[in-house]
Amino acid sequence: MLEVVHLLGVSLILGNLVLVDLRIFGLGTSLALEDLARLALPLVLLGAGLCALSGLLMFSTQASDLLANRVFTLKMLLLTLAAGNAVWFHLRGSLRRLDRTARWLAFNSLVLWLITLGLGRWIAYV
């Protein structure tokens, strides 16, 4: 069940971030970005909460194995970078600016989250 909850959280994060990022890249311009973000970002936070809770519980069942797993370590590093990227994006007001830096941060977000997703799946095979 923990893996199902974790996957639900990942789906909420990625699904909603992809929508917002695509809008930032200029797709779906008939949708107001502020309205889309107001709907999507609380779902991203809900997903992050589900992932954090389920991830911590899964980690607690095999902490020593996971700490020795380089893929897990890399996943945690990229997760930290993705979170920092999100903080930077929002603190600088990127949703209002939509400048080159906002697009660059949105692109970084997509790349970091997709690699993190792949690493999460890879953990079990290393």
Image (cartoon, rainbow, N blue to C red):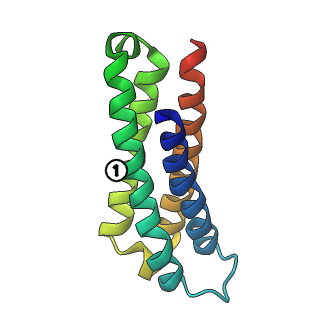
Q: Characterize the local packing of mark 1: few (<14), some (14-19) or many (20 or more) Cα atoms within 10 angstroms.
A: few
User: Residue at label 1?
Assistant: 84
* Residue 126, horizontal then vertical, whole percent: 56, 11
**Is residue 80 visible to us here?**
no
Total number of numbered discs in the rendering: 1
Q: Is residue 110 above or below residue 78?
A: below
Q: Secondary structure at mark 1?
A: helix
Up the image or down, 53 lies above or below 125; here it is below
The residue at the point 55 percent across, 42 percent down is 7
Amino acid bearing label 1: Gly
- What residue is at 39 percent from the left and 10 percent from the top? 65
Q: Is residue 79 left or right of residue 15?
A: left
Q: Residue at x 42, y 73 (%)?
A: 94
Rendering quarter of residue 57: top left
Residue located at (44% from left, 68% from top): 41
Residue 99: x and y, percent?
Answer: 50, 75
In the image, is 15 to the left or to the right of 58? Answer: right
Q: Position of residue 44 (x, y in %)?
A: 45, 60
x, y percentage for residue 82?
A: 42, 47
